[in-house]
Image (cartoon, helix red, strand yellow):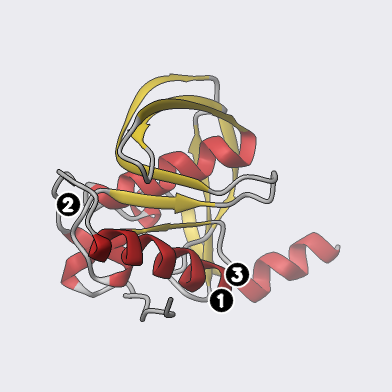
Amino acid sequence: MAVRQIRVIGDEVLNKKCKPVKEMTPRTAELIEDMFETMYEANGVGLAAPQVGVLKKIVVIDVEDGNQYVLINPKIVEQQGAQTGYEGCLSVPGKTGIVTRPDYVKVRALNENMEEYELEGQDLLARAICHECAHLDGQLYVELVEGELLDTEAEEEEEEM
């Protein structure tokens, strides 16, 4: 396992659409392990393959609910409600912004064994699923920010008040 370089806003790979994964290879399995290690090293809750420069439809998520989620070729099939809150991204370091996302989502994907499954998420998990799946279509959360992007220090100061 290895920590990979996280691509940041301005890198063209972040604006490209990803290709579906057709089979699990040793190289793809290694990529998934590296993505988890990279995400944990950067204190993130989710990471999409294009964020480490790989244009494959792979997402890893850990919202500290006791599970590690691997979503291969994910497709959001249901969404309900709305939640508005601060969102950040490992590919947009030092910035945060207010984004409205569904409060509930259901996603259909393949796991690391290439078995299809459905995952339902609410609150932070729903936000993470939407955020990471958008990366696979070349979209960054900054396109959805309501108002201005803020420095993360400014958000922390607001929370302290």
Q: Percent from the top left, x then y, of residue 27?
A: 24, 65
138 over 40 or under it: above or below: above
The answer to which of 55 and 87 lies nearer the viewer is 55
126 over 142 or under it: above or below: above
C-alpha gap between disc 2 and disc 3: 24 Å
Q: Is residue 146 visible?
A: no
Q: Give left or right: position of 81 versus 48.
A: right
Q: Percent from the top left, x then y, of residue 39?
A: 50, 67
Q: Which residue is mark 1?
A: 41
Amino acid carrying mark 3 in the image: Asn
C-alpha gap between disc 1 and disc 3: 6 Å
Label of residue 18 in the image: 2
Q: Is residue 117 visible?
A: yes
Amino acid carrying mark 2 in the image: Cys
Q: Are marks 1 and 3 in contact (CB under 8 Å)?
A: yes
C-alpha gap between disc 2 and disc 1: 24 Å
First in residue order: circle 2 vs circle 3 = 2
Q: Percent from the top left, x then y, of residue 53?
A: 24, 71
Label of residue 43 in the image: 3
First in residue order: circle 2 vs circle 1 = 2
Image quarter (top left, top right, bottom left or bottom right) of the N terminus = bottom left
